[in-house]
Amino acid sequence: MSGRTSTVVKELDFPELPSPEVPTTAFDSIKVLNSSSENLRDYPFSMGEVFENLEISRRFPKSYLAKMKKIREDTAEFREKYILPNIEEIEKKVALDPDYFPYEIIKEGIRYRFPTLIIPEPFGGPGYLAAHIGIMAEELAVGSGGFATTVSVNMAQLITLFDPYLFAVYCKESIEAEKRGETIVWSGAITEPNAGTDRWDADFQNQTRAGLVAKKVDGGYLLNGAKIFTSNGSVARRSAMSAALDPNDCVGTGCLFVVKTDTPGFSIGRVERKMGQKSSATSEQICQDVFVPDDHRVGKIGVTARFTTLYLASSRGPVGAIGVGCGRRALQSLIQWAADRRNGQGRLIDQQALQITISNMARDLAAARSAYIQACMGFDDIASKLLSPWYVRMPLRLMPLSLLTTETFRKTVQSERGRDAVNRGVEWAFPDDKMMYLAGLAANAKVLGSSTGRKVAGEVMQIMGPDAADPKWGVDRAYRDARLTEIYEGTNQACAITNFKAMAGSFVETLGS
Amino acid sequence: MEWFENEELAMISDTISTFSAQEIQGKVVDLERLGKPEFPRDAIDRLSAMGFLWGPAPEDMGSDMDRVTSVTILSGLAFCSAGFASIVATHYAALDALLAIRDGFELLKGVSGGNGERGRLPLLGIALNNDIEPFGHTAEGGRYRAIPTLEKVDGTVFFHDEGPEKKMLIARGSDISRSVTMTNDLSGCDEMPTAEMRLPDDILGGLEVLAEGNNACVAEAAMVSSLKLYYSAVMQGAARSATEYALDYARQRRQTGRAIIYHQNVRKKIVEMEIKNQSMTSFLYRAACNGTADHEFNLKDMLYAFTKSESEYVVNEAMQTLGGYGYMREYGIEKKLRDVKTLQAILPTTLTEWLGLQVV
């Protein structure tokens, strides 16, 4: 960073601009996706999403709501018992040693089934979906945004859903580990040193050379390159990694791999020192001739762009929830503080200016919470559809997990025809128009939750003055934790582009009318 | 004074720039260090040798500076390190408290060891109680926040109520070290550690009294008002440097096949940041040009309230321009945000500005 100062008033040195400028996303280049759903035509001008939401709500079984309540209670208990009493000490330890990771507390999460959240009930898991993860993330973030990230990132296991064999193998592994009292931590490695937004938006993926390259060899692939800013990167035992066969064609040759982190050639680079979320370990993951067997490639070649969009449609809602949780923490602290403190006018909680501020904060948090719940429920509706056909439900009910992990099953689903069939299933469940609609909802939820959480915590800091620094209130920590939610899982600006593209089909209809 | 075309200020700005590059950059701001930076006493001593610790002292005391110069120095130092600049800002506010009282001139001569000539000044700190309002309250049980900690400075100026009577006192680390509980819980301005200072009655009774009664009230008002002016200068400097850093980064970082400065939204944000920088600068110099009449206290309250929110916006957007890199300590932008948030929170609550402002 420059050590010099500028003169008293100095103009910024902007570069010359090309004329005319080439748009980053030309409107005509956006794939027009007139929605197949009557409700969603002309979104967001038709209010059809309101009807869509109501219809979705009616499709869920009663157990969906019951599970929401259960995970909220479980997570709140975990937070009060294990996070809040220890978080200050953990933050101090990480500040001195970024390699420190609170395994003991993560292990306590086993009894709440945090490591196996997304595993379906027929496989022995609790069968939670995105909305449940969102609720869990908010409740955890009230204690620590870092813990919320660590536990939520385990959702990276979700990418194996696109390969039923791998899904079964790793569900089985996680369930067995849980029975032994162990946790198998997952990470999802997307961002590269030269590609942040370029990796998080399917349409930009060919704009930068791949930072992780896969080379086909006998029996598998050799991975070379690096990923950065990977949450759980230094503690994960399994990492879902995106790579490309041709570094100049990430879209056409993009692949997803499940990499065991004890594979020779795999190493951890820099463990990042971060502003906040210190209880979440973020690091580089480096691959030098890491061999990944053929059966650990997920789905077809060239699916990365679609999988990225789908993954983000499920994960960005919970990121918004983390922002809401951080804001909620700050607001709760403000109310307790204002009830105790007095100034020359009397008790602070009695004062109109503060009452209206608190009311505005609570309103913004409630709106952000509605947004992430809406986005998550939209995703869950479609995800449930994946499990609804008889040919999926029957084997899940009748076949023990061990049969789905046999070599015969693997050969069937990982044959070219098998992979084609799975791909068609995903395309059927998540048609382009629906996928983009959900991606837009999730992007909105992420932006709303993260920016609201950061703003609320930031304003509370200003109101509480020096008391905000007192660790017992956790306001300073909530602000630092919330700040990351505006950046990771695609910056809020990348999310805005996603949302614009999601609506472009409707705009075309509007423009035509 | 036409501060924006003042050659003398530009020269001071250049001098501070050179000082920052030589004494602060790479020494005080060591972002790769484990833990927090050490207190930059050596760099402060060099600044003192250059005469820059005199800040707001009047010309007849040997200082050739004023508040306009002082905010220029602070803004320049904050361009490199807001934490370092905050130490100097706090010292300037303590000087202002001394200058506001009848015997302040003599006291300053005493501490400087000079007689009308500019000598080296000791480094002063302040202590604030943590109450909601800055005026008229005794900290409960004699508990204050010392900024910076007592052992880092040569003297800590603070105010204490004894019944209806206010006293202005100075504490030195050696006076009360046995009764100080050190904590350092603010997450920014790492270079300026703060501490809780506990003062039992027996220790309070033994401290040097600088002023009493109305004199002390005037001095306290001057100190709080000055803190708001000087911390605003520091936040403004941090915001300007964050903007330049974001612009430099935007020229180099490529996404979607082009440097991100060629993304319209990035340019829009940087222009917005610069508009806020210019607004903060204008307001800062407007407030610095004015004296200490009653309504000018309100002006400094307003400046502080304005700069708190605007500088946070600017540094926050600069950080967002850097994406993930902005959140990592290695790049230093996150430190600027923590520093600004700390300077927002170090003084009593925003409620003071909401409820205490009487616009005249």
Image (spheres, rainbow, N blue to C red):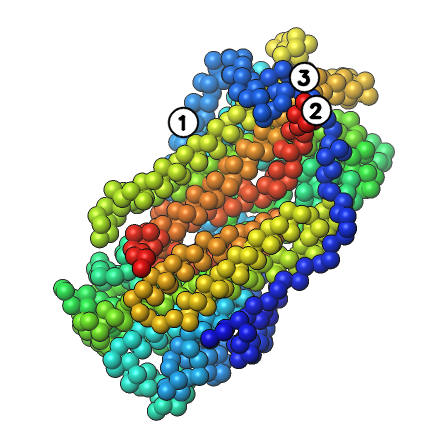
Q: Is residue A299 visible?
A: yes
Q: The residue under label 2 is which amino acid type? A: Gly
Q: Residue at x 57, y 58 (%)?
A: B274
Left or right of B207? Residue A152 is: right
Q: Say if A361 sits above or below B45 in the image.
A: above
Crowding at mark 2 (Cα within 10 Å: few <14, some 14-19, many 20+): few
Q: Quadrant of the C terminus of chain A?
A: top right
- Protein chain holding label 1: A
Relative to A160, say whether A285 is above or below. Answer: below
Count the labels in the image. Answer: 3
CA distance for labels 2 and 1: 49 Å
Q: Secondary structure at mark 3?
A: loop
Depth check, mark 3 against mark 1: the one in front is: 3
Q: Residue at x 50, y 68 (%)?
A: B75
What x and y, as percent, mark residue A12?
A: 63, 62
Q: Which residue is mark 2?
A: A512
Q: Nearer the viewer, residue A378 or B359?
A: B359
Look at mark 1 in the image and give the residue it sits on. Answer: A73
Q: Which chain contains the residue that carries disc 3?
A: A
Q: Earlier in the sequence, mark 2 or mark 1?
A: 1
* Label 2 to label 3: alpha-carbon separation: 18 Å
Which element carries disc 2, helix, strand or loop?
A: helix
**Closest to the observer: A304 or B49?**
B49
List the residue tagged with mark 3.
A36
For mark 2, name the chain. Answer: A
Q: Residue at x 43, y 23 (%)?
A: A70
Label 2 or label 3, whichever comes before in sequence order: 3
Relative to B312, is A432 on the left or the right?
right
Image position of B56 (left or right of A229): left
